[in-house]
Image (tube, helix red, strand yellow):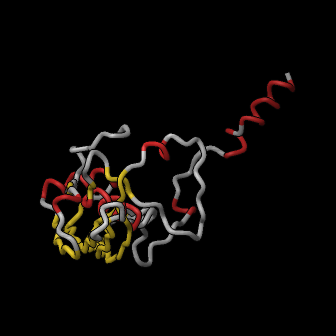
Amino acid sequence: MTEGEVSLTQEFSRLYSPEDLKEGITQLQLVANDMERDALAKRFGLLALGQLSADVTLIKEPDPAQPIIMSAQIRGTVVQECVVSLVPISSDINERIDCAFAPNDGAKSNKLEIDIEPDGEDPPEPIIDGHFDVGGLIAEHLGLCIEAFPRAEGAEFNASSMPPGKDDAEENPFSILKKLHER
């Protein structure tokens, strides 16, 4: 997505404008439909995404220069393939995220260097063309919560179960070079 462009093709896009929110607290309940869950499952390499919802709280201050504060409780059920046994594994995700949305400052975005403090707060998510995507951020955080290498309970890799093949030394590129050198 290029700067200044709002993506409407996100799998779980829920665009809001600061002008749409009243001052104070706004509560939202976001729930992914079947098509959105299927698209997110494909995006994250899941067998299925059984459920995805988020209870979202947005806080808008009276001063428009202040960022919009968001906290959300993400709940989902993912089905992945075990990396050892290839059996389907279902797991629940229940994560809380906190972030802020602020107008995209064009002058700051053109800087070549960005100072990041590892223990500091994350910078606010940008409000681009007057909109911010709560659902897109929920989907990103869902992806971060998914186990990268899921393993079924009790599943262990057994190297002796590998089919017999040629000796690795025979296939070693250096052994092939050695044979050429011996000629």
For the point 41% across and 78% down, the residue is: 153
**Residue 129 is drawn in which quadrant?**
top left
Q: What is the x, y in percent for residue 122?
A: 48, 64
Residue 127, given in percent of the width and then of the height, sits at 32, 53
Answer with the quarter of the image where residue 106 lies.
top left
Quarter containing the N terminus: top left
Q: Is residue 104 above or below residue 142?
A: above
Measuring 54% from the left and 66% from the top, which residue is drawn there?
158
Q: Is residue 107 above or below residue 40?
A: above
Q: Residue at x 20, y 54 (%)?
A: 15
How far from the left and from the top, in percent, is residue 64? 30, 61
Which residue is at the far right?
182
Between 96 and 63, the one lying in front of the other is 63
Is residue 83 toward the left or the right of residue 132 in the image?
A: right
Quick one: 174 or 90, which is closer to the camera?
A: 90
Number of marks present in the image shown = 0
Side of 145 where 17 appears, left or right: left
Give the camera-side residue of 153 and 15: 15
The quarter of the image holding the C terminus is top right
**Residue at 85% in and 25% down:** 181
Is residue 153 found left or right of 180 in the rendered image?
A: left
- Outermost top residue: 183
Percent coordinates x, y for residue 33 in the rendering: 12, 60
